[in-house]
Image (spheres, helix red, strand yellow):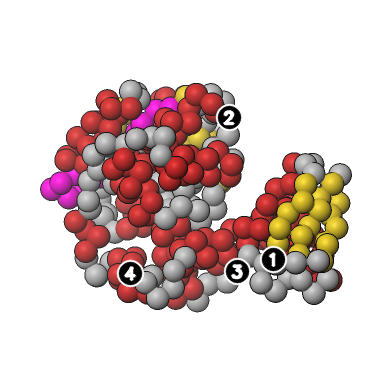
Amino acid sequence: MRGTKPLLAIEQSIKREGVIRAGEHVLIACSGGSDSVALAAILQALSKTLRLKLTLAHVNHGVRASAWQDEAVVLRVSAALGLPFKVIGLQLSRTDEAAMREARYEALEELARQAGASVVATGHTASDQTETVLLALFRGTGTEGLAGMPARRRLGKNLELARPLLRLERDALRSYAQHAGLPYAVDPSNADRALRRNAVRMALEALRPLFPGLDAAVARAAEVVGAELGATPQAAARRQVREALREHEALGGVDFEHVEAAVRALQQGASGRFFMAPGVEIEVAGGSLVVQRK
């Protein structure tokens, strides 16, 4: 089933984005939910071409009665994918979201150290990014909050945290896990409206039919803000493309993905012609670009 086009498109998007880099030893944080199970399957599918060494890891918070079932699901996933498995159990004095998150990342650092991994990968998706940005906005955030979760950041000494699924939507990842024939768990606490993130998630479920592509749009906006804050080369290339289009009064109607194709060519020193909108193309060559109107 792996060869179907939707599955290959997901794998190729992960490879193209470059959040996971060739030759890395990746500790995959797997809760047992469909997102992290799909992440494990995707990275296993890419492990040969990217020369990845993979270890599956599970943090058992021990808070819910079903916590042991989640651990069993991850164990089955590791066996199905042929990946080494590490697990750690927590004894928490506080069980609020912030305390559990802090304890979870500390535990993942320890497991990464044991495995000799250089990066921890988590299954955060575009849907999670939308929730994070909105929660920050509701708290009265500044620009940094609007950047949401970075795709990659430092986690500890000689260790980084990677979120390769931030451009992908939850439904697509659930389908990937199902097509791969892998089990996954459903967290019953997701229905608890007393948790702010769950309340936002439920409101978004009502909005998505009215705003197709909502999560992808928020994820793109957060990525752009984050790149600008970091003054990255990608942000500079993106401004170069957009300014060139603006000078030719051709920016209106150009979607994000078309701009990004030209941005990637600029960054990689590639050459080519890129469609922007009807009657508008950009020619990239030698690190420069020319807007052409037809």
Say whether marks 4 and 2 touch (CB < 8 Å): no
Give the distance between the C-alpha atoms of the residues marked 2 and 3, in whole angstroms.
32 Å
- Of labels 2 and 1, the one closer to you: 1
Residue underneath mark 2:
22
Give the distance between the C-alpha atoms of the residues marked 2 and 1, in whole angstroms.
34 Å
> Where, quadrant-wise, is the N terminus in this rendering?
top left
**Mark 3 crowd level (few <14, some 14–19, many ≥20, 10 Å Cα):** few
On residue 143, the disc is 3
On residue 169, the disc is none
Q: Earlier in the sequence, mark 3 or mark 4?
A: 3
- Quarter of the image where one finds residue 257: bottom right
The residue positioned farthest toward the front in the image shown? 294
| Disc 4 element | helix
Q: What are the residue bounds of the magenta stretch?
A: 54-67
Give the distance between the C-alpha atoms of the residues marked 1 and 4, in whole angstroms.
31 Å
Residue underneath mark 1:
277
**Mark 4 crowd level (few <14, some 14–19, many ≥20, 10 Å Cα):** few
- The amino acid at mark 3 is Thr
**On screen, residue 117 above or below 243:** above
Residue 155 on image: x %, y %: 51, 42
Specify whether 186 is left or right of 147. left
Q: Earlier in the sequence, mark 1 or mark 4?
A: 4
